[in-house]
Image (tube, rainbow, N blue to C red):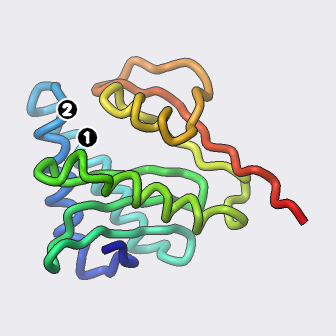
């Protein structure tokens, strides 16, 4: 079930992020550590800016198994699902909930993200399109955008 993240979830979200990165990102351990730290920094940013962001968790039997963070309603900075729950539609549900909430709230009328090479196909299937050249960063860095359609009256 999708719920608003709570401050008490921070530790569980960071632990989930670490499990996902260690399982899915084929990089040396020190690079994985840097990626986890960067994601943790985003989560801590949310802690001080809860009214400027969307942060949802997906719970199964009370445990956090997925999380999404969209800073300022346009910058999708974190999306992770516990590897034991991959391919069950959790990430898709989190993205759809975030898109619904950010529509009309995004000052850019879009959601932007930098996808890892492991997630490019996933984002493309959801309607995200390339938004600039890839950068050579650990795990890959592929800019994508989802533009909101103007609302019809």
Q: Quadrant of the C terminus?
A: bottom right
Vertical order, 123 against 13 (above or below): above
Crowd rating for badge 1 (residues with CA inside 10 Å; few <14, some 14–19, many 20+): many
Identify which residue is drawn at 17% across, 68% down.
12
Q: Please say if the residues under marks 1 and 2 sit with CB atoms less than 8 Å apart.
A: yes
Identify which residue is drawn at 11% across, 39% down.
23
Residue 106: image quadrant is bottom right
Q: Secondary structure at mark 1?
A: helix
Residue in front for this viewpoint, 89 or 76: 89
* Residue 22 % position (x, y): 12, 40
- Mark 1 to mark 2: distance in Å? 9 Å
* Residue 64 % position (x, y): 20, 69
Identify which residue is drawn at 61% across, 28% down.
131
Q: Earlier in the sequence, mark 1 or mark 2?
A: 2
What mark, if any, has residue 86 been given in the picture?
none
Q: Secondary structure at mark 2?
A: loop
Crowd rating for badge 2 (residues with CA inside 10 Å; few <14, some 14–19, many 20+): some
* Residue 133 % position (x, y): 56, 18
Vertical order, 92 against 61 (above or below): above
Q: Quadrant of the N terminus?
A: bottom left
Residue 103: image quadrant is bottom right
Vertical order, 103 against 77 (above or below): below
- Please state if 10 lies on the left or on the right of 48 as rendered: left
What mark, if any, has residue 35 been given in the picture?
1
What mark, if any, has residue 25 been given in the picture?
2
Residue in front for this viewpoint, 108 or 45: 108
* Residue 152 % position (x, y): 86, 60
């Amino acid at each position: 079930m999708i719920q608003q993240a709570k401050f008490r979830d921070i530790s569980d979200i960071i632990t989930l992020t670490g499990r996902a990165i260690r399982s899915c990102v084929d990089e040396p351990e020190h690079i994985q550590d840097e990626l986890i730290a960067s994601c943790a920094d985003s989560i801590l940013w949310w802690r001080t800016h809860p009214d400027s962001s969307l942060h949802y968790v997906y719970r199964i039997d009370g445990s956090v198994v997925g999380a999404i963070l969209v800073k300022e309603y346009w910058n999708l900075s974190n999306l992770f699902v516990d590897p034991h729950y991959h391919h069950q539609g959790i990430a898709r549900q989190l993205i759809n909930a975030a898109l619904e909430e950010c529509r009309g709230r995004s000052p850019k009328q879009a959601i932007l993200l930098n996808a890892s090479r492991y997630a490019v196909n996933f984002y493309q299937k959801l309607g995200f399109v390339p938004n600039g050249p890839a950068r050579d960063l650990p795990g890959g860095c592929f800019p994508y955008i989802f533009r909101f359609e103007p609302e019809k009256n």
